[in-house]
Image (tube, rainbow, N blue to C red):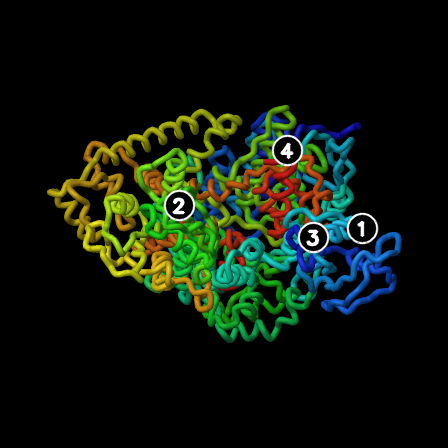
């Protein structure tokens, strides 16, 4: 086949998945093209101008530990850093930052442009070239054909995108940008099972028309916790956000106009995320609530645009301003961009292997919303994995896969490829059965080694990691070695505070496990010579390891017990159709998923308990079983 | 789905023998068997029909009933044929059926199909096994209760409450920026204690429940000629063991199953313990020692009409190492025994006469007393399965851990460790609760979405 241009890897889409994929593949030595509709919008945050949050912040830290770029870019452009859940245990704390939307985009573009082997190309991919079950290239709208041995689809909401505002609909990938219709048709033609999802975004306000005094302000943390293990300092000036509330009369007005909402008229068929409901959904499903919380988030240092978090809506654009004016503080507000809902195609992620490569077409990888996920961080981590594995394929190296017990990325990918999605998938800490082990602050301990082996972590970052690791070991030794004695004043004070006697003496290691005892207290109790050289971040990591160690051991025992017959092997050639007592539907589900153990079978959604027992019996009686 | 058939009554001769069929061809097969192609029976009613061989001659006259799926045991079309209970007839009929597009059912396959068609859950299937194996009325009542799903039902309020607590704690962790109600530690601890109480109460019924299911092993021991075999026969209500005045008549241990107030008891009569006179007696005494080691409870028989002998004391000193009772026999005769020996715990002593049956009721009460009250009529649900008991105990321990964390004001993720474990253990009895279920519950309880 003759091509106008040839690469090793082509990445379709310049969003958060696409940027990570292209950056990783290029840095791993693959000649990589990033093809996107508008090069000025690379790294665009289509919805809220923020990165991180509970579990999402964990993902960003993991991306960074593996050598991805999202964390660094966010650190350079973040304008309000906050560590969430600070009052709770370290495993569920997570960094979040609002970013300057424009700055983030420019910083991402600069980062990509300074990457060797990476070629930015503007245009729309309309077709995939597939030969003998393998992808060999793509066809552009303008007729160009570009060759590549691996292609990553990271098209976001653009596949068959349909925007709704009120009763009006128009095809678009985002407001103001064309949808990708032909590529969506190509995927269907190749036989991929395609579904429809929906998401929405709130209106953006003109900050000059907001009465800021009517809202409560929310400050950034005094000591910002960065996303990247390489970041020493957050340099952007930090801003305030504002919190306000809707009112009952506004709720009544929305309910009166529900017939105008495509969500309630039946016009929208796609399934939306339940954890990010539109304001219409909020006032209908939680009708007894007097008020709903809203956040006013300035979009950057040098713009008037304000993101109204909590007010996602698909009510008619013309109606939105009048409704907003019923909110105290927004009496004179003007909308710069109206909110809208968008429906788009996604491909059943059960088509993918753990390397995010499609089984149906070799060399084709899917990452981000095309897999039914939502969120920048969810997209970025898939992009990173797909980019790494696309390069590995081209270079003839082993693909990497991440396990559930070592990363949230592993949890996310495993959930996607085994269970599929029936609403936009977002990461939660409760999805991780190893939650206590997967902390934001130990992502380096968990994943830096992979990043280094791959070649994505440079010497200075690797040294930095080693130094930190040694410092933490020294702190742990000091915690074990330092005892607080009964005669000391601090002993008496602490024992009074906790309401317990600690015996003749207690080690700082044991003392630190008490929920009342903070890292600052421990720091003050350490001997003077160690204290001076300790950073609070390193101490917190040492204390977190110490706090959870016992729980993690106990939990592993429980999981082992529960997984006892999970490990029962199902012979790969077991003929499900020949098993008596399995309904046609169950056989289909089993054949689609081809579980290799009973544990994997248990994770298949819709598989009944009866089918599992039947399968168990069949597997135990077949020659290759157990 | 094919059609399966099996003989459903035990092997051997009996008044009637039942063959069951399940599957889409059941009714067609019955039509061929009775030679009526158009036969369309009213479901759930038995009719008398002539079963004909291939040659056309009659094989048997039998009652045939048709159960239309899904309103049948397996949820499929079923046919039951009650023939006369001759193994030959049943065999021939089953052969006939197998020629007619049905195959022999595997063990438990009818129940498996019932599970598969959603007619029962795993715990109910286990109950069927118990019901079939039940040795006494009371055990059958308990199995029938479990079959009605009563264990799952009994656990449901605890499970729902547990999920509520998990939902509240999880949402506090995951949705810190949303406008959610604050966690009330005291209130949550109270709710958790209530869950714990339900689990504790259920798991504490296991001693009685286990007794009902597995039964109790009781061995009657003592020196020769104190009336062990007479007592054995009396409890059996049968002249099973040979009784003479000759000391050492019983040479070997005999075991029989009886029902004491609904509790299955496996009762063993043993050879009297003394220095053995010959080889046979020596083996008998050795077997007695083995029976003593196996028993849940020893009934030490002593003769009330004579004095306590060193041989009695020898048996007593062995028996007092475990659970035991002392039956002072022959209370129909004048009492000659002194009962103030240190090896005799008065609360363990029952006076009776194997000859007149006096005191036998007291003995029964004393035998059952250490194992909890078991009354087949009045007791509520009892946990009978050791797997269920084990899971309830684990649930209990996990909940206790969580309660400790909660009251120590530990962070939610630590409290949740035990709660999730507890939910997993309960799930092994009642069916699994997945992360998706919990998330769904969160989204329907709280308005999430910053």
Measured as percent of width and height from the top left, residue A400 is found at 56, 31
Frontmost of labels 2 and 4 is 2
**Is A488 on the left-hand or right-hand side of A73?**
left
**What residue is disc 1 on?**
B96
**Image: A362 above or below A223:** above
| Residue A73 in sight in this render | no
Q: Are marks 1 and 4 in contact (CB under 8 Å)?
A: no
**What residue is disc 3 on?**
B7
Rounded to the nearest angstrom, the CA distance separating label 1 from label 2 is 54 Å
Measured as percent of width and height from the top left, residue A399 is found at 59, 30
Q: Which mark is residue B249?
A: 2
Residue situated in front as seen by the camera: B233 or A238:
B233
Measured as percent of width and height from the top left, residue A293 is found at 46, 64
Q: Are marks 1 and 4 on the same chain?
A: no
Callout 2 secondary element: loop
**What residue is disc 4 on?**
A624
Q: Tell which circle, 1 or 3, labels the residue nearer the N-terminal end.
A: 3
Residue situated in front as seen by the camera: A33 or A501:
A501
Rounded to the nearest angstrom, the CA distance separating label 2 from label 3 is 45 Å
Q: Are marks 1 and 2 on the same chain?
A: yes
Q: Residue at image x 77%, y 66%?
A: B48
Q: Are marks 4 and 3 in contact (CB under 8 Å)?
A: no
Q: Which mark is residue A150?
A: none
Frontmost of labels 1 and 4 is 1
């Amino acid at each position: 086949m003759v091509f106008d241009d040839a690469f090793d890897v082509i990445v379709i889409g310049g969003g958060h998945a696409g940027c990570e994929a292209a950056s990783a593949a290029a840095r791993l030595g693959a000649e990589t093209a990033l093809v996107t509709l508008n090069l000025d919008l690379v790294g665009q945050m289509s919805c809220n101008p923020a990165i991180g949050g509970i579990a999402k912040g964990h993902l960003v830290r993991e991306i960074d530990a593996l050598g991805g770029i999202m964390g660094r870019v966010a650190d350079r452009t973040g304008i309000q850093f906050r560590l969430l859940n600070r009052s709770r245990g370290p495993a569920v704390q997570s960094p979040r930052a609002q970013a300057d939307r424009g700055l983030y985009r420019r910083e991402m573009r600069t980062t990509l442009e300074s990457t060797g082997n990476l070629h930015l190309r503007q245009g729309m991919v309309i077709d995939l070239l597939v030969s003998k079950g393998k992808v060999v290239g793509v066809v552009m709208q303008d007729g160009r054909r570009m060759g590549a041995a691996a292609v990553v689809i990271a098209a976001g909401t653009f596949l068959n995108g349909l925007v709704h505002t009120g009763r009006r609909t128009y095809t678009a990938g985002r407001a103001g940008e064309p949808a990708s219709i032909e590529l969506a048709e190509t995927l269907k033609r190749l036989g991929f099972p395609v579904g429809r999802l929906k998401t929405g975004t709130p209106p953006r306000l003109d900050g000059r028309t907001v009465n800021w005094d009517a809202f409560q302000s929310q400050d950034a943390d005094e000591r910002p916790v960065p996303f990247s293990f390489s970041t020493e300092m957050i340099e952007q000036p930090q801003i305030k956000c504002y919190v306000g509330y809707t009112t009952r009369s506004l709720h009544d007005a929305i309910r009166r106009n529900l017939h105008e909402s495509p969500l309630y008229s039946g016009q929208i068929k796609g399934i939306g995320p339940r954890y990010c409901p539109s304001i219409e959904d909020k006032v209908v499903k939680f009708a007894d609530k007097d008020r709903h919380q809203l956040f006013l988030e300035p979009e950057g240092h040098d713009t008037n645009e304000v993101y109204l978090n909590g007010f996602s809506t698909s009510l008619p654009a013309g109606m939105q301003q009048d409704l907003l004016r019923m909110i105290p503080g927004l009496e004179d507000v003007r909308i710069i961009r109206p909110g809208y809902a968008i429906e788009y195609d996604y491909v059943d992620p059960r088509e993918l292997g753990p390397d995010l490569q499609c089984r149906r077409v070799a060399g084709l990888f899917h990452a981000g919303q095309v897999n039914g996920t939502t969120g920048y961080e969810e997209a970025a981590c898939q992009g990173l994995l797909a980019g790494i594995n696309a390069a590995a394929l081209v270079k003839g190296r082993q693909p990497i896969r991440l396990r559930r017990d070592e990363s949230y990325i592993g949890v996310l990918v495993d959930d996607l490829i085994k269970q599929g999605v029936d609403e936009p998938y977002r990461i939660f800490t409760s999805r991780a059965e190893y939650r206590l082990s997967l902390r934001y602050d130990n992502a380096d301990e968990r994943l830096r080694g992979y990043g280094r082996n791959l070649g994505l972590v440079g010497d200075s970052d690797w040294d930095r990691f080693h130094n930190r690791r040694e410092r933490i070991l020294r702190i742990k030794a000091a915690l074990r070695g330092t005892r607080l004695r009964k005669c000391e004043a601090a002993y008496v004070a602490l024992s009074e505070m906790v309401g317990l006697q600690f015996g003749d003496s207690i080690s700082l290691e044991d003392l630190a496990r008490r929920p009342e005892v903070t890292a600052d207290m421990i720091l003050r109790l350490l001997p003077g010579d160690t204290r001076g050289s300790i950073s609070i971040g390193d101490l917190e990591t040492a204390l977190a390891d110490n706090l959870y160690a016992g729980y993690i051991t106990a939990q592993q025992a429980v999981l082992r017990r529960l997984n006892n017959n999970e490990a029962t092997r199902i012979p790969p050639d077991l003929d499900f159709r020949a098993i008596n007592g399995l309904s046609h539907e169950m056989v289909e589900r089993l054949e689609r998923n081809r579980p290799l153990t009973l544990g994997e079978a248990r994770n298949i959604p819709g598989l009944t308990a009866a089918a599992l027992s039947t399968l168990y019996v069949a597997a135990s009686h077949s020659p290759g079983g157990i | 789905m094919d059609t399966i058939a099996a003989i459903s009554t035990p092997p051997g001769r009996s008044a009637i023998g039942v063959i069951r069929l399940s599957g889409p061809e059941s009714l067609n097969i019955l039509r061929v068997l009775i030679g009526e192609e158009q036969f369309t029976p009213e479901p759930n009613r038995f009719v008398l029909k002539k079963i004909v061989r291939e040659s056309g001659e009659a094989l048997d006259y039998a009652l045939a009933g048709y159960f239309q799926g899904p309103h049948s045991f397996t949820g499929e079309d079923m046919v039951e044929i009650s023939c006369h209970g001759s193994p030959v007839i049943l065999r021939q009929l089953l052969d006939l059926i197998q020629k007619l597009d049905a195959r022999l059912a595997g063990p438990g396959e009818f129940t498996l199909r019932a599970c598969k068609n959603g007619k029962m859950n795993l715990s109910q299937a286990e109950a069927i096994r118990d019901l079939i194996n039940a040795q006494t009325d009371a055990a059958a009542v308990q199995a029938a209760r479990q079959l009605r799903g009563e264990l799952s039902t009994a656990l449901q309020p605890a499970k729902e409450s547990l999920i509520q607590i998990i939902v509240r704690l999880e949402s506090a962790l995951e949705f810190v920026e949303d406008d959610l109600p604050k966690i009330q530690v005291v209130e949550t601890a109270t709710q958790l204690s209530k869950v714990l109480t339900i689990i504790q109460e259920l798991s504490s019924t296991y001693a009685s429940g286990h007794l009902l299911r597995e039964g109790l092993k009781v061995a009657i021991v003592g020196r020769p000629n104190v009336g062990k075999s007479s007592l054995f026969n009396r409890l059996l209500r049968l002249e099973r063991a040979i009784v003479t005045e000759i000391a050492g008549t019983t040479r070997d241990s005999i075991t029989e199953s009886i029902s004491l107030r609904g509790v299955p008891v496996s009762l063993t009569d043993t050879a009297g313990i003394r220095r053995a006179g010959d080889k046979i007696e020596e083996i008998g005494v050795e077997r007695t020692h083995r029976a003593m080691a196996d028993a849940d409870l020893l009934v030490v028989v002593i003769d009330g009409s004579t004095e306590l002998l060193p041989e009695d004391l020898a048996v007593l000193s062995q028996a007092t190492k475990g659970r035991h009772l002392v039956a002072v026999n022959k209370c129909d005769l004048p009492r000659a025994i002194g009962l103030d020996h240190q090896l005799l715990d008065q609360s363990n002593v029952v006076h009776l006469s194997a000859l007149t049956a006096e005191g036998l009721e007291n003995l029964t009460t004393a035998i059952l007393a250490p194992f909890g009250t078991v009354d087949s009529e009045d007791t509520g649900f009892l946990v009978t399965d050791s797997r269920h008991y084990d899971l309830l105990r684990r649930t209990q321990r996990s909940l206790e851990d969580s309660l400790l964390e909660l009251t120590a004001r530990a962070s939610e993720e630590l409290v949740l460790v035990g709660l999730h474990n507890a939910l997993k253990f309960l799930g092994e009895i009642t069916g699994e609760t997945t992360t998706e279920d919990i998330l769904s519950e969160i989204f329907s309880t709280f308005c999430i979405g910053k």
